[in-house]
Image (spheres, coloured by chain):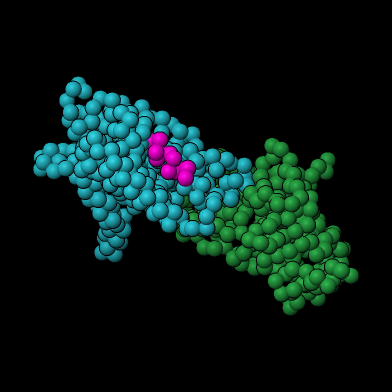
Amino acid sequence: MNKSLVELNNCGVFRNQKWLVRGVSLKVSQGEIVTLIGPNGSGKSTTAKMSLDILKPDEGTNTIKKDIRISYVPQKISIDWSLPLRSIDFVNLVTKHKTSEINDALGITGIQHLINEDVRNLSGGEFQRLLMARAIAKEPHFLVLDEPVQGVDYSGEIALYKTIQEIVKKINCGILLISHNLHVVMSQTDYVICLNGHVCCSGIPSSVIKDQEYIKLFGSNIDPTLSLYKHNHDHHHLPDGSIDKADKNK
Amino acid sequence: MFDDFIIRAFAAGIGLALITGPLGCFIIWRRLSYFGDTIAHSALLGVVIAYAMNFNLIIAVFAVSCFIALSLLFLQKRTNLPDDALLGLLAHSVLAIGLVLLGILSFIRIDLIGLLFGDILSVNITDVLFVWIGGSIVLIVLILIWRPLFAATVNLELAKAEGLNADLANAIFTILIASVIAISIKIVGILLITGLLIIPAAASRNLSSTPIQMAIISSVIGLVSVVLGLQTSMIWNSPTGPTILAIALGVFILTLIPLKKLLISKKKIELSN
């Protein structure tokens, strides 16, 4: 049953005389959540775009299973002021849905009361919930979420991640999730890839993470992206994120 | 019936207003108003070619417009210049080439004023047919590509990621603009066509809360402007194209009046009393 929906094989994107990201391999299968973490400019969004085939990799191959429904929640989206657009129109943007389906999707993300509201009157958090609702309404096979909870209040953030997990169970889709706040998502994640211009490390989140003791320890003070894994680095990063050449020659 | 030049003028004007409504909305949403101008400027070259080769005017203008639109797409990919610079480059260089050709081919006599401002009262039956048949095709194609085009207008990457053919929709949309400008040359002229695309759509924006509403209201405002503009121009003996646009501007100013707010505040006052 566990068929892979999307596969990147040693992919890289070269723009303006440098590699934005290189040597990325990943696989997202049905019913699985794969999480990408990494600092700013580490190539998370670029990787996500390759998995959606918006960006063609300059090296390596990206394979997307044919005839699957795909939903995308981009990191940044700004609606032009000249567009009269209500929440319901936005949910119907790519695929037309029944009103009941739209109500359900908006209900899941907690903004059902805003169905006829002009999109520009929504707050940042409400808009993020709308993006998510639109993605869910399609019942996608493959869902890409690029920092889906930015601007959402803390309790809402946890609730939204729980929602994501429920969606996976309900419609059995594969999710590629980009997040900077790993300690919130780690219990939902099947596989984690840590990026910094290339894959630094990847693996199944250890059982330790699910432990209440662990959450207590790393709950608030320590940056969760640093604390989740022991990074067994065999190299150093230069300030621009590229790898120190001295390490390569080791 | 179509013997009467007034009736032909109404038929051509109304047909044109119905198409420019929804197309104008997309031009506003996508911030393409300068693109319309560029295509319109380049129309002069089309007109000169049509006269020089004794060719149908509308088809020649359409061909040149498409060429300019494709050149823009090419330049966008090949240079790092911003869109407005590229549009300025194309608009004025093609206009210049048109004028140079016009000078060299001294046997051509073009009614420049008519070309710039249009002369809706001189349209013949062929022009009316072009407007209605061409216009119907444009409208049908627009409805067919509405979803990918609109999704790409909201967010290009999202539309592409979810499997819509956004690039194709964009290219087709460009051709639709070129055809509408070609159709409208004789009616409102190359200087005013962008106005007919933008003013009704802008007025409609003030009244509508959904995209489809905006497209329809925009057509209605265009239609009202054409009908009132034609009648006014006959009464005052004013140039027709500019009169139509002046009426459209009047409608736009009317839409700025916040009717809803006025009604609500009146109710509040009544309630508080």
User: Between B3 and B186, which is closer to the camera in this rendering?
Assistant: B186
Give the percent coordinates (x, y) of residue A37. 74, 63
In this rendering, is residue B156 above or below B118?
A: below
* Res B262 seen here: yes
Indicate left or right for B126 with A234 as reference. left
Q: Position of residue B247 (x, y in %)?
A: 21, 46
Say whether residue B65 is magenta.
Answer: yes
Q: Is residue B67 magenta?
A: yes
Examine the image and state in which quarter residue A212 appears.
bottom right
Please state if A20 lies on the left or on the right of A83 as rendered: right
Question: Which quadrant would the C terminus of chain B be assigned to in this image?
Answer: bottom left
Q: Chain A: what color?
A: green
Residue A144 visible from this viewpoint: no
Q: How many marks?
A: 0
* Residue at the (70%, 52%) spot, across then down: A58
Q: Looking at this view, name the residue that lies furthest to the left.
A: B236
Tell me the residue at 40%/53% (across/down).
B89
Which percent across, then down, holds residue B154? 51, 50
**Residue in view at x 33 percent, y 30 percent:** B53
- The chain that appears cyan in the image is B
Q: Is residue B149 left or right of residue B47?
A: right
- What residue range appears in magenta? B62-71
Residue A241 picture quarter: bottom right
Return the residue found at the far bottom.
A221
Residue found at x 51% / y 47% = B74
- Main secondary-structure element of the magenta-colored stretch: helix
